[in-house]
Structure formats: structure tokens, C-alpha cells
Amino acid sequence: MSGVGMNKNLIAAGLISSLFVASAASAQTITPENNAKLLIWTDSTTVDYMEHAAKAFNQDYGYDVEFSFRGLAPIDSASRLIQDGGSARVADVAEIEHDLLGRLVVAGGAMENLVSAPRIDSTFMQNAIDASKSEGLSYGFPVSFATTALFYNKDLLPKAPETFEELIEFSKSFNDKKAHKYALLWDIQNYYESRSFVTLFGAYEFGNNGTNAKDIGINSEKAQQGLAAMKKLRVANNSNPIDMRNAQVRRGLFSEGKVAAIIDGPWAIKGYQDSGINYGVVPMPKLEGQQPRTFSTVRLAVVSSYTQYPKAAQLFADYLSSEKMLKQRFEMTKAIPPVQSVMEEIIVDADEATYAIITQGYYSDAMPSIPEMGFIWSPMASAITAMWVNDKSPKEVLDRARSIIAEQIELQE
């Protein structure tokens, strides 16, 4: 075993031992190591909140942990932990998107959640619980979630669409391809956005809640039925899908009033607000009587396996996922907490967009975080394009996609 691997195992073993002793003797409590210094990586837009959380952590418990912060995109945080852990200074606690958790765990970069897994399992939304785990073990501390919804132009659509069939009907008198006018837009080739149609009738990517890579459900009869339903939306969205891969193009057309409705997420809200467009947000409308199930992305705090202060890091990550700090995070950043009791509090006075995202969250599934999920995106983009542009049958394109995905998974084993 390498020195780094042995060091990681010794740290984890020592922490497990201390937690066991603490739980066995009620007079003892877990406290941070003396002179603990934690480096925190979080999205640059969240640094102010994180600084607030660090001060509150020390004040609430009388600790004297020293904190430093770096604004780093979640996808970069996971990559840096994987690439640099053990050879360079990396975060003690980093925030990542949950779909990267599987890769991080396989690479040995994340420490198991040893302080609050039972609390998370009993109080968080199911999609957040699923997102926090890898190989059946709890690693992540969920701090927020996001999913897509339907943004619509209130001047063009005074009544919010309740079904996609309404947008199809509207498109018959509105759409003008030469003028770039469309009733509906989304990134068709991006499986993250098209997934809600593929799974409309109960299809899935991987079995056992996205954890069994040997059970690939992407070409099932239910998936074929969902893709066939999606194909009906070509009437409302007759744009060139290659042109619409660019989010700035799609959002620009919507902001200019040339698009009646667009599938997007909370990350786009500020841009729409700044554009001055009169827009609303609703959960995904029904299609063929079915409620689309979107992907949800859960933001996780994870403790680095390379931390020299595992007790302090675990306690701070746990604090970030507490109800108190989830409410504070929402107040400061509008990030939606993945705890039903907290959502029930904030939804009472929530704005239209927050209300829609929370509501759609109940009809969302955590994106599978197993490493094999990485093999889904490209084959599914090709499959959807072949159906949408070249008029291939759902069965043909999905069978081919499954074959490619299975082959790629087999090659990595």
C-alpha cells in the first residue's frame, strides 16, 4: 500500500474510532482537532455565504477553526481532488455536483460521511439521499438541488401551459423558422434536458435507482414510447437542434420575445430578469397525460480523503447541511434546500420561479452518480438527433445507443 493510501486509511480509522467512543460515552463529544485549518472550495457565487457559515460554525459551538476559501466551479473541484489529491494542497471540504461523486469515490478522493448519514437518510428528499451515496455508502452532505422547469413568455402565453399539447397547438399560428420564432425551445441533443421525455412512461438509465450499471434501461419499450411522444414536439420546436445547442442563442431568442416557452433551470433566472422580459415559470407541463420526470442535480459538500483535520472537516460539512444553514443559504443565494420540511417553510412566500422548481423537484430523479453515467451522454445525443433530424425510429436509435453504452462499460471493466 502507498504512503498516501495508508495515511488516508489511518485517518479514517482514527475518526471512526473516535466517533464510536463518542457515541458510546455520552459525556464525550466530537470536537475539531487543535489548531485545525480548513480550506473550503465552493462556487465563486457562494463564497460570501461560505464565509458567513464558517463564522457561524465557530460562534455556535465555541470553536476556533481557521478557514480559508477558494471560488472553484464544482466540476473543477471534483477534478482537482482526483488529480491533485495526495500531491498538492487540496480542499478539506469541497462542494461538487453529485453526478461526479462516483468518480471521486472510485479515485479515493472522498471520505465517507461518518457523522450524519442516518440524519440525511431520514430527513432529506429521496433524490438527495440517492445523490449522497456511492456503492451504498453515504459520502455527500446535500446542501441544495436544482432541476429544470418551463419558462414562458406571459405576453405571448397569458395562461401558463398545463400541457405540451397546448404549445403544439399554439405553434401552428406562431412558428416562423425564417424569423426564428418558436413556440418551444430546449437543447434537444442534451440528454439532461431531453431525459424527461425519454422517461415519460417509466423508463430509466440504470436499474436499482441508477446504481446497477449492468441493468441498462435506455432502450426499453417504455423508453421507445417516451421518445415517440417527444417526437410529436417537433411541430412546436422546429428549430435546427445544432444551432440551439448554444444556450446563449436559445436564451437570447426567448429574451427577445421570439420564443414562447423554453425549458431551462434556475441558473438562467438572473439573465432573464436582467433582460426585462415578462416571464413566468411553471413545473413541466404534461405530455400525453404523463408528468415528465426531470433530472435533478444535487450540490454536495464532501470531505476530502486527504484532509489532515477529518474531525473539523466532517463537523463543518455536517453543519452546512443542517436546517439552520440550509435556510440561511437559501436566503443568501436562493439555492433550494433538499429537505421537505425546509421547502415547506420557504414555499409559502416563494417567488414564482422558486415555487416551480420546488414543485418540479417532487417529479425529478437524481442523475445517476455511478461512473458509467458518463457513457450515456454521447450515444443518447446521437440517438435523439437521428430520430429528430433523420426520422429514424425510436427503437432503432435506442437499440444502437444501448449497444454503444454497453460496449463502453464492458471495455472499462
Image (tube, rainbow, N blue to C red):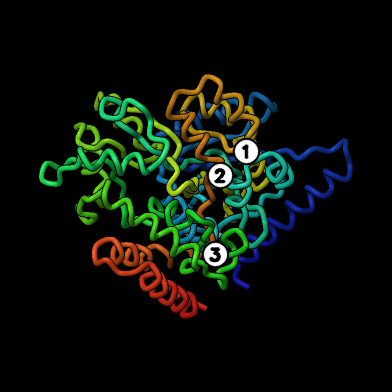
In the displayed structure, would residue 258 be above or below residue 9? above
Identify the residue under disc 2. Answer: 301
- Which of the marked residues, 3 or 2, is nearer the chain's N terminus? 3
Disc 2 or disc 1, which is closer to the eye? Answer: 2
Label 2 crowd bin: few (<14), some (14–19), many (20+), radius 10 Å:
many
What is the count of numbered marks? 3
Judge left or right: residue 137 versus residue 37: right
**Is disc 2 placed on a helix, strand or loop?**
strand
Question: Compared to 29, does 88 lie above or below?
Answer: below
Q: Crowding at label 1, few (<14), some or many (≥20) Cα neighbours within 10 Å?
A: many
Residue 164 visible? yes
Q: Is residue 87 above or below residue 2?
A: above
Q: Tag 1: residue type?
A: Phe
The residue type indicated by label 2 comes to Ala
Residue 251's mark? none
Residue at 29% across, 43% down: 184
**Disc 3 and disc 2: Cα gap in Å?**
25 Å
Task: Give the residue number, with chain letter if any, for mark 1.
Answer: 316
Q: CA distance from mark 1 to mark 3?
A: 33 Å
Give amino acid for label 3.
Phe
Mark 1 lies on a secondary structure that is helix
User: Quick one: 336 or 97, which is closer to the camera?
Assistant: 336
Q: What label sits on residue 206 in the rendered view?
A: 3
- Label 3 sits on a secondary structure element that is strand
Single out the residue that lies furthest toward the top: 349
